[in-house]
Image: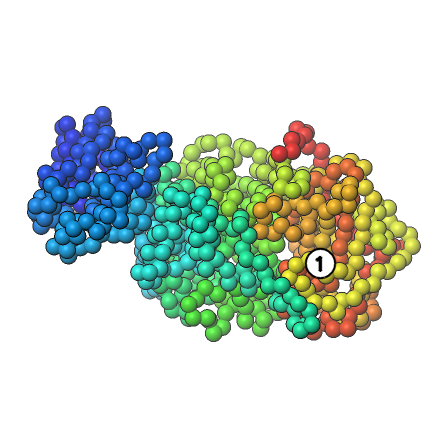
Amino acid sequence: MMKGIFLDGCVTGVDYRTQTMEGALDAQGMYEYRDGESILFTIGDFVLGSAAAKAYMTPLDFVAESEGRHRTVSHYQVVNTARFLIGLGQIGSRERAVVDRFRYDINFVQETESFEKDPVITAIFKELGKALPPAAAAKNIVRRCGAGIRKERDVKIPVSDGGYVLADIYRPLTEGKYPVVMCMGVFGKEFINGFVDNDEAEAARQEAEDRFYDDYANTETKHMLQGIFFERMGPCFASALPVPNPDPDEHVEPPMGPPPCLVPVSEAFEQPCAYDWVPYGYVVINIEERGTGKNTNVDLFRQFGAANAKDYCDAIRWAAVQPWSSGNVGLFGASYYAMTQYLAAQRKPAGLKAMIPIMGDYDSYRDYVYSGGGLFNRADNMDPCREPQPYNFMKKALDEPFWNEETYGPEGEYMSSCDIKAIDLPIFPCVEPDASLHAKGSSEAFINCSSENKKLMVINGCGIHFWMYRPEYLDKFRAFFDKWLKGEENGIMSEPAVDIQMRTGNGAYYWRHEADWPVPGTVYRKLYLDGSRLTGTAPETEDAVRYNADVYHKLAGRVEGATFISAPVEEDIELAGYIKAGLYVSSTTEDMEIHMKVRVLDENDHEVIYPAPTSMERGLPLGFGAMKVSHRALDETRSREDLPVYKHTKEAWAPLVPGEVVYCEVGSFPTTGVIKKGWKLRLDIDPAGSRWVDYHEESYRKGAVNTIYTGGSRLSFVQLPVLPKSVSGFEIK
């Protein structure tokens, strides 16, 4: 005898009969059958449909046309049957009597618009005091149940101070104990992202979810999905752009709308998608932080703060002891949902066994607030509260411009940092060299964590929100969790620890598979600045290049400073890791920004574009980084040959004396790239950037002239991470 589930328990009391079994659906929608039998579903004498019995069944199984090559829940008979049953819900004697009286006139074989206006259907539901659910909502339930997924919305997960966080939980329909994949963040747990708190918003999300799965190729559907996506994320992206130039005489074009590539490819945004995990034997839990969505107490919201991390830990411990949980929890998510993982994992909550932080930072000061010492990240774009917070972490950052343990350490109220050495569980970070945020944090997490079981993927893409849902990468992520949450010996950890996409230009790439990161055997090759050249030989003669620093950033394009170009390279060069510049500089004012950009010119002096054609960061060069020279003091205990790490303390702060020459090192985000024989390198050192704009720039930019010194005793250089020759060679894709 076997057990199956019809829909997900939203309908009870439906009669069923097989060749050997009969009964009514119980509170879980369960029925019994034997292998090889067919099953008939009825309400009394009214036939709903029949099919071969199996573990999960829905009205989809009753309609032959919907089960062919083009399986679809949109067939009108499927939709009408589902709406009818879900609308009835619990079927008792009263419902049976009404359906029996009308059974000869109930017709599911008609268009859905006609069905909901059908006088027989109208009479049934009016008499019962019930209502047909919207077609989209019914289709979404059928679609999930056909995949074996049960959804619970707005589950209150208790936290230690007596409050709660709200979660949507997706579980396999078959009862059992399963490992949990979870995340917590602020973008909302509804379809794509966002929050729903009224009937109109609910209907819109249900419609969007249905069209996403049923009509994704339609251009109008893509525009609709893009609109929903940017309803929540638009303010985040817009606020991250530079402030428009205040010069009234200069015309500034407004930012373009979202490019066509920014259409969601998953119902989840940066979060685990139920369809990617539940059918493979996992529970998925997506959590909203306190103070967001329906959990409206703004005073409880402390973005990236210790209190949020403690809530996350409470939720992990809760998930580990639920009756449907195996006790093993893994964290999964990208960007914001990767950053919160680090903050929780360092506290080692019971049940947490592994984590997959995709493109996320763990050091609040160095990675996403004061990267390089400049307040380059306009992070006020992250306030998700319905009423703006009177005091948020952007205001806190402005009040605390230097690193200190109380503000930026693990117990920080608003923007705590992870003690990365405390992370010793299996971890699988991902790094995207196309991005101007998160890549360095993910790379450094792999390098500096204490885990003996770690993997890394360095991947070129059009944005993490898209490639993280591709099947080939999900297969890797599932294999990692299968190993650490299910105990499967699948060989994932015997593969090379690091997968690297080597970018060859215009979106092309090939893979290298390495034992570690940075790649063992990397040679750090210096090119020296000499006048306007880059040369492999240290110039003996001193020189200087001056440029105007009293310029404002642009929304696009370059604010020019100094440029240095190499001779054509004599052989193909593979780069992967961090680029670094060591520069002797001075300014006529008390500070200066250095925006370092390493570009590549082909044989026709056209720039080689390394990001993918659809990348959200299409304009980024091969390598880039930025810093303020007043923050040049290095933390010698953390700095490496390939990456400078700054102290950033008030005591180490060193404003410039006008005209005084100082030495500073500028680090980059991690990168990959192939420079082909005959191509050239170009180093741009600019006074301002098109993406990163320091809040405090007017205090030191006015009237400023910056100088870079080269040659002699002032050997300014750029350093490249050159890989050893690949044994297997490569194939350009």
Q: Is residue 301 left or right of residue 707?
A: left
Q: Which residue is mark 1?
A: 558
Kind of residue indicated by mark 1: Arg
| Residue 35 percent location from the top left of the image | 23, 27
Task: Give 414 or 511, whichever is nearer the viewer.
Answer: 511
Q: Is residue 295 left or right of residue 638?
A: left
Q: How many neighbours does mark 1 have within 10 angstroms: few (below 14), some (14-19), or many (20 or more)?
A: some
> Which corner quadrant holds the C terminus?
top right
**Can I make out residue 324 in this image?**
no
Task: Give 276 or 139, whichever is nearer the viewer.
Answer: 139
Which residue is located at x 24 percent, y 44 percent? 80
Image-quadrant location for residue 277: top left
Which residue is located at x 55 percent, y 52 percent? 259
| Residue 625 percent location from the top left of the image | 68, 55
What is the secondary structure assignment of the residue under circle 1? Answer: loop
> Which corner quadrant holds the N terminus?
top left
Q: Is residue 336 left or right of residue 41?
A: right
Which residue is located at x 40 percent, y 38 percent? 486
Which residue, as the protein is rendered here, is positioned at the far top?
36
| Residue 159 percent location from the top left of the image | 36, 60
